[in-house]
Image (tube, rainbow, N blue to C red):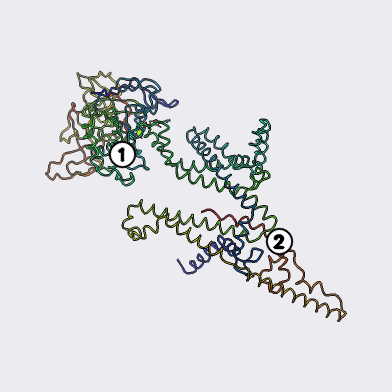
Amino acid sequence: MRNRTVLLDHVSIRFGDFTAVDNANLKIDSGEFFSFLGPSGCGKTTLLRCISGFSDPTEGKVLIGGKDMKGVGPNKRPTALIFQHLALFPLMSVAENIAFPLEVRGASKKDRRKRADELLDMIALPGIGDKKVSELSGGQKQRVAIARALAVEPDILLLDEPLSALDLKLRQHMRAELRAIQQRVGVTFIYITHDQGEALTMSDRVAVMNSGVIEQVGAPNVIYNAPRTAFVASFVGENNAISGKVAGQTEGMVTLNTPVGPVSGRAAGGRKYKPGEQCSLFIRPEQLTLTGEAGPNTISATLRSQAFEGASTHLLADCAGTRLRLSQINTGAAAAPLAPGAALTLAFAPEHATVLPAGPMASE
Amino acid sequence: MNPRGSVFSAAYALAFFTFLFGPLIIMVITAFNSSRFPRVTPWECFTTGWFNVLITNDRLMSGLLSSLFIGIGVIVVAVPVGLAGALALSELSARLRATLYTVLIVPILIPGVVLGISTIVFWGQIGRTLGGPAQAFFYNGYFLTIAGQVTFISAYAMLVFIARLQRFDATQTEAALDLGASPGQAFRKILLPFLAPAIGSAAFITLLASFENYNTTVFTILSGNTFTTALASKVRHGTDPSLSALAVIIISITLIGALTHEAYIRRKTLLDSGKAEQSAIFGNPVLRLLTHPGAVLALLLCIAGGLVWLGSKHDSSVCEAGILEEKRAIQRQLQEEQRSRIDAQKKAGGQTQTPAEGGAGNPSPFGGAFTGGLAPESAAPEPAAPSNPSPFGGAFNPGTLAPAPE
Ligand SMILES: Nc1ncnc2c1ncn2[C@@H]1O[C@H](COP(=O)(O)OP(=O)(O)OP(=O)(O)O)[C@@H](O)[C@H]1O
Ligand SMILES: [Mg+2]
């Protein structure tokens, strides 16, 4: 099997004084579906353009299939990039678009047409080869762009937020489709998105980026359940953050003194905390429960608002200026709705909470 | 809208279109009046003779050939130069771009006269330095005119390309590179097809600009003539309706071109909309063929050709001889009257009132140009008019000769 790995070796990319990507170290395996997840402007596209050869890293090396790619132009790399807005060629027909990579390699007209038809079958759009690009729907364009990128069988397919222009329904459909195509062709997919749902559902592994730094790399469930930094905890999924100072640590459990009272949670990655260190405790809305009596790890809060959402009810509460969100599974019994301003006592199990050193958080 | 408002807008629209097209219509009419001065009234005879006068004018026709030759030369040089300039601008950093833009656009702002003279001086110097056959090549009206016009016309072409390039999505080129195209292939297969319409318009604008240029060309053509310089000198030596005939030809070509283009555009929008099959016109095979731009062009050319053929058969000499005879008669009659008046005065022996009364018999230096409607009463000056051209008449002609290219 072909070596389709991508290795980023201490890659930094700077524009003047501005560091867009800071010391990225990463190995992406052959045939892996790997996602970069991060907020807008964190350097995802910059990194992707560097892998596909449109720019060179200011520092460090990019290795594809074990070979250093320095000085190798985009047209000589075994990568294919699917652009954020697809960049299909509007003056060519669908078949000409798909066969473009073959055309520039000097394939005969007959071979080109044959390959285009094969690829159209693969993306389940047979017989649209003679249409114009402008006659296609958003999802069809999407699939044509994928077919074009796969026409000469690249080792690595890079996708820059390819679904961002589609509506929700189509996006969900295309996620499954992309995943299926990837498993069929076995090409390494490197996928960029700022939509965490997309990253978590499709990927084998996810790298979470923030302002040029790769904060954490791991399988989706690890990223979700065991975030390593305050940014990852606040960016991936909904989370309540309670800030405070370390009071003490026993084995894996850390207790914080916070404005809402003393609370304890797991120390992320078995890290040791110094007493007095500024930390944040993260607890997911679905792990917070309403309880009758006060006790350890309980918070007395005031209800601000609630929203019934079918399967669950979302509550927004407030304690000493800290906003807390709860998500309660509806059991079916018609519980009397609570009035805003009602006093609540919230509780959570310490093993469900994560304590992380204070750091930048994702803005809402 | 209230009725007063709509009356006003109708009147305004009428005034506006009269202003736009009035001169053209008048010009077209004068081309068919046998009067030796371009005018509508008095109508003398319907004639096509002025077209004959036009095409038998050697100076104008050889000027036309030079103009075409120069125009093609300018297209061949200015379009690639403009394209290169626009591409260079789109690749540069913002600060360099502003500087280079100014440098490239300056020739448009420099007076044409200056460009013309400096072109002669510059290439003359080079020719003299090199000597021999190079001198003959560089110091040649055609070469100098192409060189002089290219200096500023390439900037027009560049502006056309810049406008088109601003709408180009640079990721298209990147996508082509990413898919394995070399930079040359990306240029030929992606950027050039995108620019194709702009190349067409740039070539057209370049041809027009070259054709109608006077200020620079009048110097650089040296002792030769282009159509425009020949026309200008003809107007300076007096005008006749053959210039109106020229206007008729130009207007007809423009109209044929515009209608064909319109047919092409309509067909294209219809096809692009995807609803072509449902449309009443496109659904019917005969109408579909008839509205094809090629068919429209052929039809218009047939009509034009037919009219030319009919016109060439028309003979107005009998009518013109009649008019001439009429004029002679009127003149004789006037002379008669004058003589009898002078006799009467002599008889009366009174003071001489002749100068005031004899105004009608005393040809005005402005000829018939300003007395059109009164002409039958004051027919005497008329025969003098063509040989005594108005100093103002010619001034209005160059403008009307160049219908706005739309
Ligand atoms: N050519 C450039 N010159 C200067 N700064 C740049 C350049 N390209 C990108 N940047 C900066 O680098 C940072 C990262 O940009 P990038 O396009 O990689 O973001 P992104 O993560 O892809 O964001 P988005 O999700 O919005 O596409 C941004 O702050 C951007 O302003
Ligand atoms: Mg981006």
Helix, strand or loop under label 1 = loop
Helix, strand or loop under label 2 = loop
Chain ID at mark 2: B
Reply above or below: A198 against B11: above
Q: Which mark is residue B300?
A: none
Chain ID at mark 1: A
Q: Is residue A316 visible?
A: no
Query: Does the beta carbon at disc 1 come under 8 Å from ligand 1?
Result: no
Reply above or below: B118 against B237: above
Residues packed near mark 1 inside 10 Å, few (<14), some (14 to 19) or many (20 plus): some
The residue identified by callout 2 is B389
Q: Is residue B288 visible?
A: yes
The answer to whether B101 appears left or right of A216 in the picture is right
The residue identified by callout 1 is A164
The percent coordinates of residue A58 (x first, y second) are 40, 22
Three-letter residue code for mark 2 = Pro
Three-letter residue code for mark 1 = Ser
**Observer-nearest of B134 and A282:** B134
The percent coordinates of residue A89 (x first, y second) are 36, 40
**Observer-nearest of A131 and A196:** A131
